[in-house]
Amino acid sequence: MLLGLIAWLHSVYIERENRHRHQAERELQSINQLQLQAVVAWRLQSLRDASMLVEDDLLAAALGQWVAQGDVLARERVRDRLRTLKELGRYTAVHFVDPQGAVQLSSQDGSGWQGGVPATEIAALQTALASAEVVMAEPASDPTFAFPFASVFAPLYDGETPLGTVWLVQDLRAGLLPLVEPWPTPSQTARSSIVWRQGDVARYLNAPRGTNADVLQYHYPLDGKPTAVVQALAGVRGVFYARDEQGRAVMAMASPVLGTHWMLVSAVEVAEVFADVRRREFFALALPVSLLLLASGGVFAVVLRRGWRRERSLMQALQRNLLWLEGAQQAAAIGHFSINPEQGLIQMSALCRQIYGVDRETLALGDWLALIDPEDQERLAEVAARLERGEEVKRLQYRIRPANDPRALHWVEVWSRPVRDEADGGARLIGVVQDITARKAVEAELSEHRARLEAQLRIDPLTGVANRRALDEAASFQLALAIRGASPLALLMIDVDHFKHYNDHYGHVAGDECLKAVAAALQAHVGRAGELVARYGGEEFAVLLPLSDGRAALALAQRMCTSVRRLKIPHAASTTASCVTVSVGVAWLRPQTVAVEYARTHHAVAEGATAWPLMQQLFEQADTALYEAKRQGRNRALLNDMTTDVAT
């Protein structure tokens, strides 16, 4: 019988393991197909964007006018079309290139992007012009860009004459990799990779798990071990079992990407797939056996002990209930009490006496009130009077100073209700008391946490300096102080030079790091009360300087320009300098101007009504100075000489 039970348990275990295997295979297949759909959709969207350009007769006509006649308006219409496509399609860059691969027009502002189509992409450009169809090049990395990219070429013609192609560039780190790298379910070993055959090696878009290689930098020889990727490129499809590049056994799923020779290979280690289920099934199958053995022994024990347990059941039940009640009160730090209003006495339990720090079981109501914190005694005196009259006070919170430690301050919470004593028929008040000092501390901490969260709402999450909301609030407050005290107030408007070119050349990830470094350099120069560095928007920053005149503000702005240059952040796409620089516009409100404006308007309107017009003019003057600094060549600070007319 025992052997039969063991055989049955083994068959059940095998069946449940196979069921879990099929479930894991279906899950791997579903995730692979979802990621495949996302990759195909990404590729088709890029091709559709390019096809719309090919079919855009207005774009071709404008290009023809510009190329043939040098029409400047036609060129700007083409640039607007490229800029719109870049912003809506979230491309890193959009260029118009001539049939020889030279960039003639770019989506960004300015004189256009310098350079040409990389040599690795020329073949795709020529194929697009020769076939008059949209062509997507293979993912590539080239010194032209500081990031791995994908290119799509849309050929444009003036009749039968080829004008060139529109070159759509997309950063693979922001466009394609997020579609395959995140794994939607909890897993330590699962990963998907896009691979394709290139000669006698398999080339990876994203490196496999356990390898330290950048995007497009990992290769694996096809004549090596028959790994999952090698088998997929050899024609294996669907779910199969193999080994990965490090020799670990994996469950894999391979699917071809429509319209390409790419393969999407998803894999997860077999050890992870079956580790939990084997442990869980072992315990699940061991449980019935254990229960069976325990039940057999339990029946025998129950028969022997039934008589003895029957005699003591009532006593044990009573003791257990008393212990539970006492334990529950101790766990919750709750004591109970009874008040006799006629006698003016309060009777306390042991835990209640511990809370109040007294050693007597019975205490006069007057002595009890003396333990209350002086700030709450008047309120508690009214409560005591109500209790003496037999009125009900259900819930009350107050502070006490325990008798054994008068310097300590504790919070307590009391629940009570009136009852009638069956022995003498008198009215009593019974209730419970709990020390809630820890809870009050938590509530105070939560209140402080909410205050900190409110402060975080005024911090720019990328740079760590103040955001636009905090700047508006600080500007309104500081202007009100300047009005009342007739003191100066200065404002700096700062713009990172050629930042759009920086993003196009280095990518948005590097752009974010650049903004963080610039913000830190600006923040290092402010420290007086009321001074504030804020991110105004995009690559613009604003610095509010109360109690500073134009000369001091200009000197600080020049020091900030120097600090940013000393960061030596390379900027190969800048026409101003080889590193990242900033331009600064300075404006300030003179004390006399503020005082005159306040005196002129104070009798008619509230103070707040004049603050924002003044601040708006100050921002406009600083912005005007900023644009003048950029017009004069950037990488400089300029004081607006019109600040004397700000409020006139």
Image: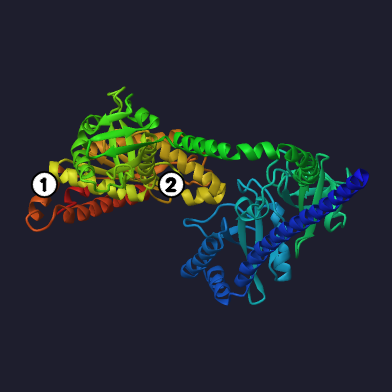
Q: Secondary structure at mark 1?
A: helix
Q: Nearer the viewer, mark 2 or mark 1?
A: 1
Determine the residue located farthest toward the top in the rendered image. Answer: 404
Q: Which mark is residue 497?
A: 2
Q: Is residue 320 above or below residue 284?
A: above
Residue nearest the viewer, comparing 254 with 414: 414
- Picture quadrant of residue 40: bottom right
Please indicate whether residue 18 sits to the left or right of residue 258 in the image: right
Q: Is residue 261 left or right of residue 313?
A: right
Tell me the distance, in whole angstroms, between the alpha carbons under discs 2 and 1: 37 Å
Residue nearer the viewer, 170 or 265: 265
Q: Residue at x 52, y 60 (%)?
A: 107
Q: Can residue 206 be seen at all in this image of the molecule?
A: yes
- Image label count: 2
Residue closest to the eye, 311 or 193: 311
Camera sees residue 163: no
Mark 2 secondary-structure assignment: loop
Residue type marked 1: Ala
- Circle 1 sits on which residue? 595
In the rendered image, which quarter contains the C terminus? bottom left
Instruction: Say the numbered circle drawn on residue 247.
Output: none
Please provide percent x and percent y for residue 317.
56, 40
Q: Tell me if residue 64 comes above or below residue 112 in the rendering.
A: below
